[in-house]
Amino acid sequence: QVQLVESGGGLLQPGGSLRLSCAASVSMFNINRMGWYRQAPGKERELVVIMDRAGNTNFADTVKARFTMSRDSAKRMLYLQMNSLRPEDTAVYYCHARDLYNKPYWGQGTQVTVSS
């Protein structure tokens, strides 16, 4: 079992920056893929970024030039740095992981609201 706990969400103005954190309960050696999804009101959950075991990332086109993701394996932490935020980035952001058996796990989500 993998438990994921997100933190760092909040309310901010357009153009601002925010960093989300995700704490994993197991070593990242036991995780095959890890990343972030988001779900805006009335919309389906969508991929923001996913990282494989080698550290290769795949970003959604809508965030590619503005968001970066990093991990600290020693601390079992995953981070999402979001810059130049837009109102359309408003969503609940979920940390996501798949273990070595490809079983999916989700965090509880953290709200990000971008509004003037």
Image (cartoon, rainbow, N blue to C red):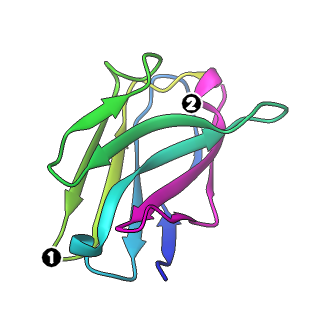
The x and y percentages for residue 40 are: 72, 35
Give the quadrant of residue 88. top right
Horizontal and vertical percent position of residue 82 = 39, 36
- Residue 104 vs residue 41: left or right? left
For numbered disc 1, what is the local secondary structure? loop
Counting labels gives 2
Disc 2 element: loop
Q: Is residue 31 magenta?
A: no
Answer whether residue 19 is visible to the viewer in this image. Answer: yes
Quadrant in the picture for residue 42: top right
Q: CA distance from mark 2 to mark 1?
A: 33 Å
The residue closer to the viewer here, 16 or 36, is 36
In the rendered structure, which amino acid carries the disc numbered 2? Gln
In the rendered image, which residue does mark 2 sit on? 13
Q: Is residue 90 left or right of residue 32?
A: right
* Position of residue 51 measured from the top left corner of the image (x, y, whole percent): 29, 45
Q: Which residue is mark 1?
A: 74
Q: Amino acid type of disc 1?
A: Ala
Which stretch appears magenta?
Answer: 87-116
Q: Is residue 8 positioned above or below 57 on the image?
A: below
Q: Residue at x 39, y 82 (%)?
A: 25
| Mark drawn on residue 22 | none
Disc 2 crowd, CA 10 A, few/some/many (<14, 14-19, 20+): some
Q: Residue most toward the front?
A: 101
Q: Residue at 56% across / 30% down in the picture?
A: 13
What residue sits 65% from the left and 34% below the top? 90
Please report the residue visible at 32 percent of the width from the left and 31 percent of the height from the top: 58
The answer to if 107 sits in the magenta stretch is yes
Q: Quadrant of the C terminus?
A: top right
Answer left or right for 87 relative to 96.
right
